[in-house]
Amino acid sequence: MFEKFSDQARHVVVLASEAARTHHHNHLGTEHLLTGILAAGGPTGATLTTWGLTTHHIDSALDAIPAYPNTDSGCAGPPFTETAKKALVQSLREASLLGHDIIGTEHLLLALLADTTCTGTGILTHFTALGPNEMRDHLRHQLTEHSQPHR
């Protein structure tokens, strides 16, 4: 599936893995994907910033998650949680629904927002004044204004 990801979307996954390691988490969850989206910058990261999300907000939320270091030394990085795997699959659906061939960071964020119970969406709604549906509508509106997905 990662072959359908834009370079920036792949970079989000790398940044998410680094965030999980930095916070000594033995998993890569939607909270780490959210971290990666913000850290990757670009139009989608800028959107998160305009909604009021900061690196400090995410770091404080990640610090509140118990640290369980990954003890599998043969593992290249922390394994994806089931929720994060679902979000990655959902990002493909989001791109397809919009008629896009490439999965960009905006599709990753739409996928996170599609699951209102995931940790990443919980962090986002905690630190912003918008609800998940408002955020999804805003992103979709941005995407329909531009013929190409943001990468």
Image (cartoon, rainbow, N blue to C red):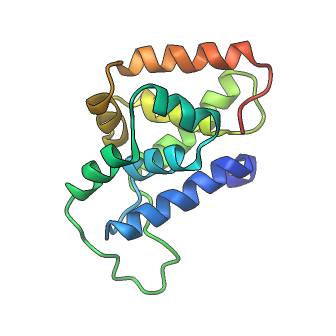
Q: Residue at x 64, y 39 (%)?
A: 42
Q: Residue at x 58, y 34 (%)?
A: 44
Residue 24 in percent (x, y) is at 31, 71
Image label count = 0
Relative to 45, residue 4 above or below: below
Q: Residue at x 34, y 19 (%)?
A: 131
Q: Quadrant of residue 104?
A: top right
In this picture, residue 67 sits left or right of residue 105: left
Closer-to-camera residue (96/78): 78
Taking the view exactly as shown, the residue that stands out farthest to the bottom is 73
Closer-to-camera residue (32/118): 32
Relative to 80, residue 138 above or below: above
Residue 6 in percent (x, y) is at 73, 46
Relative to 144, residue 120 above or below: below
In this picture, residue 99 sits left or right of residue 58: right
In this picture, residue 85 sits left or right of residue 125: right
Q: Residue at x 37, y 63 (%)?
A: 27
Closer-to-camera residue (1/62): 62
In this picture, residue 29 sits left or right of residue 138: left
Q: Quadrant of residue 25?
A: bottom left
Image quadrant holding the C terminus, namely top right
Residue 99 in percent (x, y) is at 75, 23
Relative to 6, residue 11 above or below: below
Residue 144 in percent (x, y) is at 70, 14
